[in-house]
Amino acid sequence: MMQNTIQAVPSIFYPESDGKPMAETEVHRDLMIDFIQILKHYYKDREDVCISGNMFMYYEEGDATKSVAPDVFVAFGVAKKQRRTYLTWEEGRTPNFVLEIASPSTFKDDIEKKKELYASVLEVKEYFIYDPLGEIVPSFIGFRLNDGVYEEIDFVNDRLPSFELGLELGEHQGILKLYDPTTSDWLQTLPERAETAEERAETAEERAETAEERAETAEERAETAEERAETAEAELEKVLEEIKRLRRK
């Protein structure tokens, strides 16, 4: 009699890479990295937000073909940790915000296939598409989900507001950046923050040197005043001695 054996159900392998380049050009790559770093710094004090990009996101358990890799995405309500892939059924949430950095070769996919996927399957609340080289029209567009359908976001002061982030996306000095309307400041990239910190350190050092110079000047003045006081005291003693001598005569 043949003995029955229990076989384990084969586990599904979810690839972490497709072997393709990270981005179309260095401009696309740098913008993607800068945006991720800016957002990570902005939300550095929150532990319930995942900020990433160029990482496979699987949205149907058991089917490794159901995946997408947003250039930049933000998901609220999930733990801040390192991930190799983003499995929506394990995280329990899909992204609130997605930014695709487009090019002529990707725009059709971004504006059609991905737009439909983000709206109907992943239900991404806000979706932005930006072409840093200005080779496609429109080169910058945003959508907000309303009853399962994307509606185009209107520009305000040449920027597209993101309700999900509480920030605005717009070009600053020819580069797509994030603007904080509560502080009226453009959020800085990592190199810009380093440069600002260096400038502040130099300013603080200059102030310290100035304060030291002022202290030395004050000390010198105090010494001069002390010397003058001693001189005046010596002259007074001479006068008193002269008065005494004259009285004795």
Image (tube, helix red, strand yellow):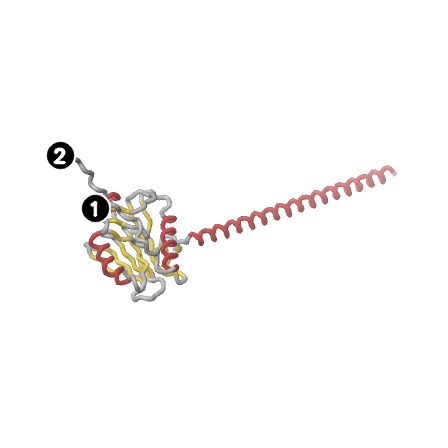
Type of amino acid at the residue the image marks with label 2: Met
**Residue at mark 1:** 62
* Residue 194, position as x, y percentages in the image: 46, 51
Q: Residue at x 26, y 58 (%)?
A: 143
> For residue 136, what is the image quadrant?
bottom left
Name the residue tied to disc 2. Answer: 2
From this view, report whether residue 196 is shown above or below residue 231. below
Please state which of the two labelled residues, at mark 2 or mark 1, is closer to the viewer: 2
In which quadrant is the N terminus drawn? top left
Residue type highlighted by circle 1:
Gly
- Label located before the other in sequence (2 or 1): 2
Residue at the farthest front position: 1
Q: Residue furthest right?
A: 249
SS class, disc 2: loop
> Pointer 2 and pointer 1: residues touching (CB < 8 Å)?
no
The disc placed on residue 5 is: none
How many callouts does the rendering have? 2
Quadrant in the rendering for residue 5: top left
Q: Residue at x 23, y 42 (%)?
A: 11
Query: Residue 150 in the image: x percent, y percent?
Result: 22, 58
Residue 165 visible (yes or no): no
Badge 1 marks a residue whose secondary structure is loop
Left or right for 96, reference 225: left
Q: Nearer the viewer, residue 203 or 76?
A: 76
Closest to the observer, 107 or 47 = 107
Neighbourhood count class around disc 1 (C-alpha, 10 Å): few under 14, some 14–19, many 20 upward:
few
Task: Judge left or right: residue 145 versus residue 24.
Answer: left
Q: Looking at this view, is 105 or 20 the one in front?
A: 20
x, y percent for residue 126: 27, 54
Quarter the C terminus occupies: top right
The span from disc 2 to disc 1 (Cα, nearest Å) is 32 Å
> Residue 240: which quarter of the image?
top right
